[in-house]
Amino acid sequence: MRNINPETNINRVYISVFQGNHMEKPLKILHGSLNNRVMVELRSGRSYQGVLDGYDVPHMNLVLKNAEEILNSESCGKHNTIILRGDNIIYVSP
């Protein structure tokens, strides 16, 4: 996975999200979350908490390190590295 500069393709993203009291572009937030802990929820109901190590555009596949897998509010596994397919992601919370 390659990390991108969110400024290069930011004009393709038309969705904005609220972060605090101001609007932010999603790719800018994602880029700012690199090397920080995030929570990712999938369509299956599983969630993962881990350090965002990388992502790709346009598919939004994510790579998490030191990730904990959560199902029904209970930890059900730990992963050194995991790749999450962008099509299955509901949200990413920095």
Image: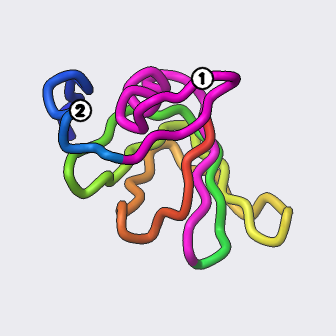
Please name the residue shown 63% across and 45% down the image: 39
Mark 2, residue position? 10
* Residue at the bottom extreme of this rendering: 44
CB under 8 Å between callouts 1 and 2?
no
Please name the residue shown 36% across and 63% down the image: 85
Determine whether 47 is above or below 12 in the image.
below
Residue 33 on the magenta span: yes
Residue 1 on the magenta span: no
**The C terminus lies in which quarter of the figure?**
top right
**Which element type, helix, strand or loop, lies under badge 1?**
strand
Determine whether 38 is above or below 86 in the image.
above
What type is the residue that disc 2 sits on? Answer: Ile
Image position, residue 81 (x, y; %): 44, 45
Please name the residue shown 19% across and 43% down the image: 12
Q: Which of 77 and 61 lies nearest the eye of the viewer?
A: 61
* Lower position in the chain sequence, tag 1 or tag 2: 2
Please provide the residue range marked out in magenta.
15-43
Image quarter for residue 53? top left
Q: Which of 22 and 62 lies nearest the eye of the viewer?
A: 22
Mark 1, residue position? 22
Q: Is residue 65 left or right of residue 3?
A: right
Image position, residue 2 (x, y; %): 18, 34
Image quarter for residue 90? bottom right
Please name the residue shown 53% across and 40% down the image: 17
What type is the residue that disc 1 sits on? Answer: His
Q: CA distance from mark 1 to mark 2?
A: 17 Å
